[in-house]
Amino acid sequence: MPPIVNCLEHDVSRPLLVALHGWLLAGRLWTPLAAALAPDWELWAPDLPGFGQRARPRGLHANLASYGRWLAQAAREQAGERLIVLVGHSLGGSVALHAAPHLGDQLVGLVQIAAGGGVYQPRAFAQVRRGGALFLRWRPGWLAELPGTDPLRSPLLADRRAAQGLLACSTNRGAVRQIPMLTARLQVPSLWISGSRDQVMAPSYVRHLAGYADQHQVVELAGAGHLPMRQMPAQLAAPIRAWLAQAC
């Protein structure tokens, strides 16, 4: 099973953190945060099917519900009898919300990073879909073969059907309206983290979606953009550690 991140020796009596990357990214995104949380907390960050090094199984539909079911099964297999905390980033946060109902009592918490929304914006979402489709059609895949382009490999080589299907699904009216309902049904504590300089997911949208959760805490990281796990892993790890100490 491709990547990922196991650092030093971990306390297996603690929940396993299962981290989900966003659109066109891969599990390696989480490597700096995993190191910042080790050895106290183990973070497992799989490539979602069709991204990174994981192929998309033929029977897996490219929509949030199917990916949520896949994630729940993969998390159970990785965790064994351990409890689970889901950690979602951006679109990966939507996948986590779809997975949560399938994990039952094994799920004890949810951390959402740069994951918000729940407000349907027809024009903006149509532009996102068009832009995403154009990128996937014309991206120069040959660049992935050049030295020093490892960080670009996932966007350049991601499965086109998976990438386009998830983007279309996550921005359609029904899916956008479903996300707040899934958030409201959470039976576990949740931590929502935004970046003050995030140009993709503004803090106001993170706060809006978090407000649907019964047991939630919101943290805004000063100076953070859309990828705080890469930009400032130590600063991101601090509120996660503090929240885990209380919630788990």
Image (tube, rainbow, N blue to C red):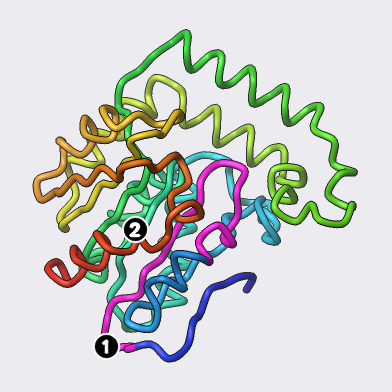
Residue ranking furthest to the left: 214
Image quarter (top left, top right, bottom left or bottom right) of the N terminus = bottom right
Q: Can you tell which of label 1 and label 2 is closer to the viewer?
A: 2
173 over 11 or under it: above or below: above
Residue type of the residue flagged with mark 2: Gln
Image quarter (top left, top right, bottom left or bottom right) of the C terminus = bottom left
Q: Which residue is mark 2?
A: 235
- Judging depth in this view, the residue of 6 and 68 nearest the camera is 6
Label 1: element kind: loop
Give the x, y percent position of residue 107.
26, 66
Disc with the residue nearer the chain's start (1 vs 2)? 1
Q: Which residues are magenta?
A: 11-31
State how far apart marks 1 and 2 are (Cα). 25 Å
Q: Are marks 1 and 2 in contact (CB under 8 Å)?
A: no
**Residue for point 43% across, 50% down:** 228
Q: For the residue carrying disc 1, how many other residues have a C-alpha within 10 Å: few (<14), some (14-19), or many (20+)?
A: few
**Residue for point 45% across, 22% down:** 172
- Judging depth in this view, the residue of 55 and 21 nearest the camera is 21
Residue type of the residue flagged with mark 1: Ser
- Judging depth in this view, the residue of 135 and 122 nearest the camera is 135
Q: Which residue is mark 1?
A: 13
Q: For the residue carrying disc 2, how many other residues have a C-alpha within 10 Å: few (<14), some (14-19), or many (20+)?
A: some
The question of residue 19 being in magenta is answered with yes
Q: Answer with left or right where residue 106 lies relative to residue 50.
A: left
Label 2: element kind: helix
Residue ranking furthest to the top: 123
**Residue for point 35% across, 17% down:** 120
Give the x, y percent position of residue 231.
48, 51
Give the x, y percent position of residue 129.
58, 21
Q: Give the number of the disc on residue 132.
A: none
**Residue for point 28% across, 76% down:** 83
